[in-house]
Image (cartoon, rainbow, N blue to C red):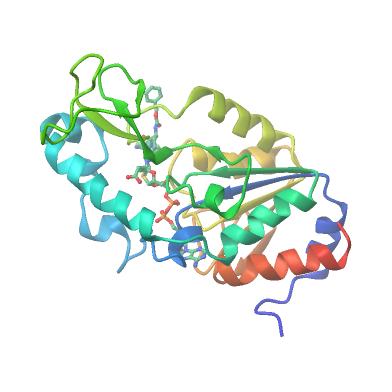
Amino acid sequence: MLYVALPPKLIERLKSARRVVVLTGAGVSAESGLPTFRDAQTGLWSKFNPEELATPRAFRRNPRLVWEWYAYRRKLVADAKPNPAHLALADMEKIIPDFHLVTQNIDALHQRAGSQKAIELHGNITRTKCFDEGTIVTTWDDTGEVPPKCPNCGGLLRPDVVWFEEAMPEAETALAFRLSANCDLFFSIGTSAVVYPAASLPHEALARGATVVEINPESTALTQKADFVLTGPAGVILPELLATLRMFGT
Ligand code: BJW
């Protein structure tokens, strides 16, 4: 038996959709054991203050604390494995010709599940860059300093993620907005849909007449606007959606 009964009208839209965009958030990695940000009991921001950890000001104030917090998170990510939601999305990319995955996640679990062309809006925790120059750095001298220093300029190294008050990467952002404005089916999955500019993407799709589907166990800032809401965990609902797509020989 299916966890959610897919509404017949959604099945029609799935069958006829030509351009599909999926936006994912931290909820997609929750079933891999990675904490989300805003879930009341378990989210990172229920225990840590984003202003002390995820802004350039926080890094300038206490670079050691911020580096160590990301070292802890990098270890969580390295120990995590893609879950059925990541795997179903990687399969959808293979069977839907015009399919684009846009993610706010920095954990690279989509790529580890096999997604070939995930568009990362908030960077990637597995990469490191120079705080001063912004260039990606792959090796540095281990002198025991925390954070380590950039081998080119001696500046401090930081994770290649997008903090509050920082701009998202230009090319990825432009592409995500263009794809969302031109899709006919848009999925918002495992995101509270409150962090901008990413949270604008479903509204961009809606404004251009696309059907918007939300998959989330809780209601979000988008729920009232979505055309279809599938209430439940992504790791259960996405494999069911994939099975339905396969049934129709998409
Ligand atoms: C499940 C599930 C399961 C659970 N299955 N689902 C006031 C108004 C409007 C905007 C602003 C404002 N004040 C400030 C701003 C701008 C700010 C912003 O939007 N703030 C809002 C919070 C108000 N945005 C920015 O600062 C952005 N930059 C910017 O605007 O730049 C302007 C600029 C231009 C030019 C030059 C300079 C500047 C940048 C935003 C960067 C966000 N960064 C973070 C941290 C990344 C690094 C790190 O990981 O440490 O990105 S914050 C955090 O939030 C992270 C996430 O990608 C992002 C979104 O969170 P997400 O993924 O939605 O997670 P949650 O926890 O919120 O939701 C999880 C959901 O999953 C829940 O709904 C659960 O129910 C669900 N779930 N289990 C499916 N099994």
Name the one closer to the observer, 226 or 154. Answer: 154
Residue 128 falls in image quadrant: top left
Q: Where is residue 61 drawn, in percent x and y? A: 11, 32
Q: Where is residue 162 drawn, in percent x and y? A: 37, 35
Q: Could you tell whether 230 is left or right of 170 in the image?
A: right
Residue 231, relative to residue 115: is it above or below? below
Q: Where is residue 62 drawn, in percent x and y? A: 11, 36
Which residue does the image show at 55% across and 47% down from the upper left? 111
From this viewpoint, is residue 39 visible? yes
- Numbered marks: total: 0
Q: Could you tell whether 151 is left or right of 110 in the image?
A: left
Residue 1, relative to residue 118: is it above or below? below
Residue 236 falls in image quadrant: bottom right
Which of the image's four quarters has the C terminus?
bottom right
From this viewpoint, is residue 213 visible? no
Which residue does the image show at 33% across and 21% down from the upper left? 134
Ligand 1, image quadrant it occupies = top left
Name the one closer to the observer, 109 or 168. Answer: 109
Which residue does the image show at 65% across and 79% down from the upper left? 3
Which residue does the image show at 88% across and 64% down from the upper left? 248
